[in-house]
Image (cartoon, helix red, strand yellow):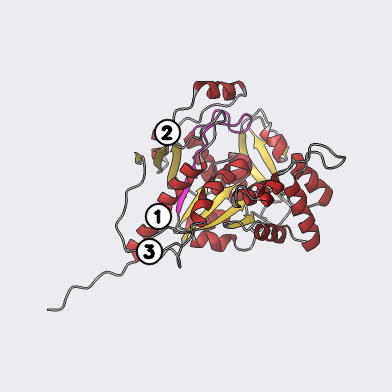
Amino acid sequence: MHSRSGPPTPAGPPVDWVHDPLRIFAIGGGTGLSTLLKGLKQYAHQVGATAREPYVDITAMVTVTDDGGSSGRLRREFDMLPPGDVRNCIVALSEDEALLARLFQYRFSSGRGLKGHSFGNLFLTALTQITGDFARAVELSSAVLAIAGRIFPSTRQNVALRARLADGRIVDGETRISRSDSPILRIELNPAGVKPSPGILDAIARADIITLGPGSLFTSIIPNLLVRGVARAIQRSPAWKVCILNLMTQPGETSGLTAADHIDAIHRHARARFLEFAIANSSPIARPALARYVRARAAQVEIDRARLESLGLNLIELPLLARGDKIRHDPARLAAAVIDLALHSRRSRLIQTAPRSRPAAR
């Protein structure tokens, strides 16, 4: 394992980024994935790209097991997939100050039946009712906001989470699971064996880099790996596989888990060891901010380097902390780290596949 500020730079043939862009496949859900996407879109929006400028093709796979808040209400009332995490990712890939993006995030504070709902969730619900297909509604909403990438719900089938806990209990539903006091031994999909949305497996196969996280380990990241064929496709893909480590643990879900524990949980559920890199924050966290999180039963994720090495991971430590009172990743810095790795992945593959010159005939 190498703990460094960034990967080594391989020499290699030039890349035509316009006709063959960097392909990034990002897996997750909730606020973590949207943070990464917000940073990555700056590369997709480059104007007048040339063969020497990185140009990025972004694909996101978003978990659809949320059952709380506005998403949960709409899911129960309309028998549809929950729109909230997908909505956040759509907005993350749209223009920051665009009126439509702000409209999508607008949440009603009053009104019978409207209070607590966001406009974007209602918009996706209406489109789902019109088209009869949530994935099609996501596609149309993405076009309306002219987003810089593609977003796939992990599956088109109505699916929920089930957790097996250390105390022997079986808990159903994402909201109840995230509030559990007992450690989570295993997460399952109910029903099991759901199919991935069309396009996901192909995007995985063509990717230069596949990222997992940041985000809730058991309720945002791992559920995507339980969709039929996804873990195997990731394992077989030539892309570099990267886990973006969380900054803090989550009470009731990952309390007491170290960085290596996160990696181990991913591999156990995927039934494959495919992660090659782990990106971790090296910036110190201010004591007042840390104290607030500790009072809420969260803790800084311990980077246990020796165990990460035993799992075969290359650890990359960079200053990734955003400014402000909340402990969050900085979107621009996080995206830059991912782009850097994607560049190295592409160039390494080009070197491996480049034809070797034959010795001159005598």
Dot 3: what SS?
loop
- Towards the viewer: 109 or 70: 109
Q: Which residue is mark 3?
A: 15
* Above or below, comparing residue 312 to residue 14 in the picture: above
Which residues, given as a range, are shown in magenta?
240-258
Q: Which residue is mark 2?
A: 282
Q: Is residue 245 magenta?
A: yes
Query: In the image, which disc is placed on residue 343?
Result: 1
Asked if the residues shown at circle 1 and circle 2 are in contact, with their CB atoms under 8 angstroms apart, the answer is no
What is the C-alpha distance between the residues marked 2 and 3? 31 Å
Q: How crowded is the residue under tag 1: few (<14 C-alpha within 10 Å), some, or many (20+)? A: some
User: Whole-percent x and y of residue 107?
Assistant: 75, 41
User: What amino acid does circle 1 point to?
Assistant: Leu
Asked if the residues shown at circle 1 and circle 3 are in contact, with their CB atoms under 8 angstroms apart, the answer is no
**Given the current orientation, which residue lies at the most extreme bottom position?**
362
User: Whole-percent x and y of residue 134?
Assistant: 73, 57
- Towards the viewer: 54 or 152: 54
Q: How crowded is the residue under tag 3: few (<14 C-alpha within 10 Å), some, or many (20+)? A: some
Q: Is residue 33 magenta?
A: no
**Given the current orientation, which residue lies at the most extreme right position?**
112
User: Whole-percent x and y of residue 90?
Assistant: 64, 52
Q: How crowded is the residue under tag 2: few (<14 C-alpha within 10 Å), some, or many (20+)? A: some
Sequence-wise, the earlier of marks 1 and 2 is 2
Residue 136 vs residue 19: left or right? Answer: right
* Above or below, comparing residue 121 to residue 328 in the picture: below
Residue at image location 64% in from the left, 49% down from the top: 91
Sequence-wise, the earlier of marks 1 and 3 is 3
Sequence-wise, the earlier of marks 2 and 3 is 3
